[in-house]
Amino acid sequence: MSQFLATVLQVNIYVQPVYLSLAIIFNSLNIRILSSRTLRSSPCTHYFIANAIFNIVYASLLCPISFARGFSIDWTLNPIGCKMQTYFVFLSPILAKAMLVLASFDR
């Protein structure tokens, strides 16, 4: 393992929990604000709420995986873990971006 990769994995141990907590806090705040009665009447708001939900799912899946790699734990070595990680890690950001595209079409 190169020195740079080892340094990145060590930094991930400290950065990923902060990123996870900030992502959950700010996306939950986004959901809370967009769920108000006046904003909920707009159909575009539903796309932004779905975007925040998919961002929470993405952060909740990606951060523990990156955090575990810092301790040399890789659960993608078995076929089921590899397929699950690939599916969820690629699906969540695609759906989040699709919600933004749908919101822009709705406008």
Image (cartoon, grey):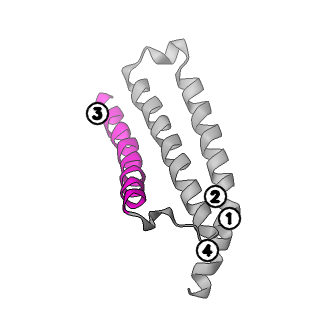
Q: Is residue 31 left or right of residue 98?
A: right
The amino acid beneath tag 1 is Ile
Q: Which mark is residue 13?
A: 1
Residues at circles 3 and 2 in contact by the CB criterion of under 8 Å: no
Cα–Cα span, label 2 and label 4: 11 Å
> Which residue is the site of mark 2?
16
Q: Closer to the observer: label 4 or label 1? A: 1
Residues at circles 3 and 1 in contact by the CB criterion of under 8 Å: no
Task: Residue at 49% x, 36% y: name it.
Answer: 52
Residues at circles 2 and 1 in contact by the CB criterion of under 8 Å: yes
Q: Quadrant of the C terminus?
A: top left
Q: Closer to the observer: label 3 or label 4? A: 4
Q: Secondary structure at mark 2?
A: helix
The answer to which of marks 2 and 4 sits earlier in the sequence is: 4
Is 66 rendered above or below residue 50? below
For mark 1, does the 10 Å Cα neighbourhood hold few (<14), some (14 to 19), or many (20 or more) residues? some
Q: Quadrant of the N terminus?
A: bottom right
